[in-house]
Amino acid sequence: MAIVNQKPSYWVTVRDNFWNFLVAEDGAARMYEADVYRSPVVKSIGLTQTVAEGNIYASGIVYDYTRLVQGAEIALDAVALDHKLLNKAIGAKVDGGFAYNSSLDLSQEFGFGYYLEQRNGKRIYYWHPRCLLTQNDDTVETSTDSAVDPSRSFTIRSLPTSEGVWRVRYYADKSDSSALKPEEFFASVRYTDGVQAASLTVGSPKVGTACAATVVYADSATPTTPTISYAWYISETADGEFEAIEGATSASYTPAAADEGSYIKCVAKVSGSAIGYVESEAKQVAAA
């Protein structure tokens, strides 16, 4: 029996991190500020899950323990963080050029995300919807013999939401034009506790007749004026490679004569008062 040595199939590089501060919470719904802060200063990120274990006691018998992930601690090593972002996260009172740290816990909850670049052209996005920040130190190391190497160490506590969600992951292929880009993902996933877009339906496409796309929400919810962007795609076969239809970015598309016999589908990205990335089934375009 031979021993086969293997090496990793791809390299992973940590890219920018994203911050979004909580402004209101109503049950499972968490509302954040409109602006998402992007901070391209990460040197390394490490994550340790927080786990609770305990025995189950029932009918006079103690059963095997249960294991429940209650969140995580994220070790963030960065060149620095923007002072406004840092002061806001730790709850420091700012007055002109002065920042005052209080003995009271004035830290503000925020959503925190980052993404990884893989050597095989893939990306993994991570979003932690409920976080608190602890600044570990203010150490800055410099040397006259080498380049300056400033380093700040932070601990981010990722806590579960009321629905138990402490992390959201999304896998993307950079070559896929329909996949969410970093700015799209981190601008929409903020409402992960809110209304979810469940599916996308389209009518029966026919040359010369408008074919409408409709987003269907989970639990028959009706969110208030969500932001929805649409993109229509076409292919010669139902399971073939789809290409974006130029200019087709509204809730409906009217197939042209040249589309007859081809298959079309729609992709919708939902943000604002709801969240989701939904895709319709491909349908064949009928003659007029």
Image (spheres, rainbow, N blue to C red):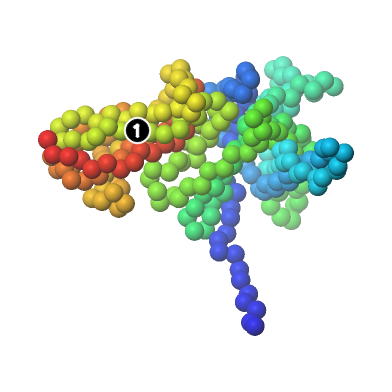
The location of residue 213, given as percent across then percent down, is 32, 30
Which residue carries the number 1 mark? 201
Which quadrant holds residue 145? Answer: bottom right
Rate crowding at label 1 as few (under 14), some (14 to 19) or many (20 or more) other CA atoms within 10 Å. some
Q: Residue at (45%, 27%) from the top-left corner?
A: 217
Q: Residue at (67%, 46%) from the top-left corner?
A: 45
Task: Left or right? Give the position of 260 relative to 186.
Answer: left
Residue type, numbered disc 1: Thr
**Residue 256, visible in the rendered structure:** no
Q: Is residue 71 above or below residue 34?
A: below
Q: Is residue 116 above or below residue 279?
A: below
Task: Left or right? Give the position of 262 relative to 199.
Answer: left
Q: Is residue 2 above or below residue 115?
A: below
**Residue 246, visible in the rendered structure:** yes
Report the quarter where the C terminus lies: top left
Report the quarter where the N terminus lies: bottom right
Along the line of sight, the residue nearer the viewer: 221 or 154: 221
The location of residue 254, given as percent across then percent down, is 20, 32
Q: Is residue 201 above or below residue 175?
A: above
In the displayed image of the protein, which residue is found farthest to the front?
59
